[in-house]
Amino acid sequence: MERECTVCKFIKPLEEFGKSPKGKYGHDAQCKKCRYAKTGRAHFLRNKEKCYENAAKWHAKNRDHIN
């Protein structure tokens, strides 16, 4: 079975999409390559300050979970 990525618009096999119970066919709408480009290292390098702020907020809220 195949699916079209909503970002790159290529039709790819379902194995190239991450699993998601909310997605059609049980997979994400974006392929793994496009999702990584959005949320991976490149995103971090473009948005370092915001990523550090979000991490600090998460750590403050989840101290019990971390320990």
Image: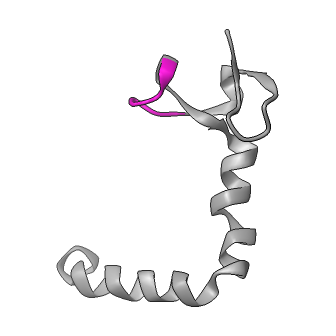
At horizontal 78% and vertical 31% (from top left) the residue drawn is 9
Q: Quadrant of the N terminus?
A: top right
At horizontal 72% and vertical 80% (from top left) the residue drawn is 45
Residue 35 to residue 17: above or below: below
At horizontal 45% and vertical 88% (from top left) the residue drawn is 53
x and y percentages locating residue 58 in the rendered image = 33, 79
Q: Residue 36 occupies which quadrant of the picture?
A: bottom right
Q: Is residue 14 magenta?
A: no
> Which of the colour schemes (rainbow, by chain, secondary structure, one colour) is used?
one colour
Q: Residue 33 occupies which quadrant of the picture?
A: top right
In this rendering, the count of numbered labels is 0
Q: Residue 12 occupies which quadrant of the picture?
A: top right
x and y percentages locating residue 50 in the rendered image = 53, 84
**Left or right: 45 in relation to 28:** right
At horizontal 64% and vertical 81% (from top left) the residue drawn is 47
Task: Pick whichever, 6 or 51, lies toward us.
Answer: 6
The magenta region covers 19-24
